[in-house]
Amino acid sequence: MSNSSGSTFANVALEFVRVTEVGAIAAARWIGKGDGHAADKAAVDAMREYFNGIDFNGEIVIGEGAKDEAAELYVGEKLGTGKGPLFEIAIDPLECTDSVANGRPNAISVIATGPKGSLYRAADSYMEKLAVGRLASQVIDLDASAKDNITKVAKALGKDVSEVTVAILDRDRHETLIAEVRATGARVQLFTDGDVAMAIATCLSSPPPHCAR
């Protein structure tokens, strides 16, 4: 990649950061007002408007739904001025609308991007997820047991298993997982919403959580 191309991509990346900022600011005006739909729409409108002023050629591959389900930021929608580099976009303008509506934490505006053909076009579904910070990133395995993963994470972090905290979304479908984690001696931190925010939290300098599921 030439220096000019690298500069172009860097500039677009910074603009994408700004897109998440305008979405978060727009949604924040609805914190605690009991209307998650209005908060989500505010984020969608603000992000779409900013996106379409950026010199790039984008297509949403994961968004607010299919074209017949969402008026804006739907799967297949083209974004940007049409000039500049090609990007695929996965976007959730407001993850955790209920958190905003009820004044709870962990709501976030999220974008993931990559060159054309690089993003997995996932259907709406529940997926197994496991997030850890940099030090443990090479030792985890989604196919391994909770015990194996926690033991390896503890070793990578230089901690005893009893010092490891695993954040788990508080849902009935996770009852078995919660029991398995507690059986190892590790701590469980249950949260009601916001698995993206909790996944990011594992990468911060002062966790816990050390893992997020």
Image: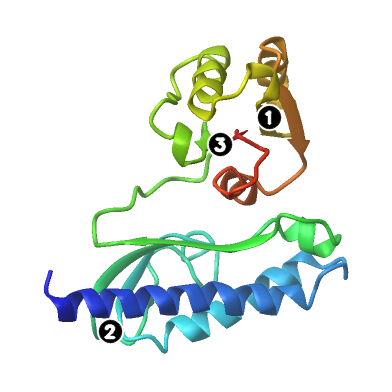
Give, as a three-letter code, the residue at label 2.
Gly
Answer with mark 2 or mark 1, whichever residue precedes in sequence: 2
| Residue type highlighted by circle 3 | Tyr
Residue shown at 85% from the left, 62% from the top: 103
- Which residue in the structure is indicated by mark 1? 165
At label 2, counting other C-alpha atoms closer than 10 Å, the crowd grade (few under 14, some 14-19, many 20 or more) is: some
Q: For the N terminus, which image quadrant?
A: bottom left
Q: Name the residue under label 3.
A: 126
Q: Is label 3 in a helix, a strand or a loop?
A: loop
Q: Residues within 10 Å of mark 3 (few under 14, many from 20)?
A: few
Whether residue 210 is visible to the viewer of this picture, yes or no, is yes
Residue closest to the eye, 8 or 121? 8
Task: Find residue 5 and report its horizontal and vertical position in percent.
Answer: 18, 77
- Sequence-first disc among 1 and 3: 3
Q: Is residue 120 above or below residue 73?
A: above
Q: Does the residue at mark 3 contact the one at mark 2 (Cβ under 8 Å)?
A: no
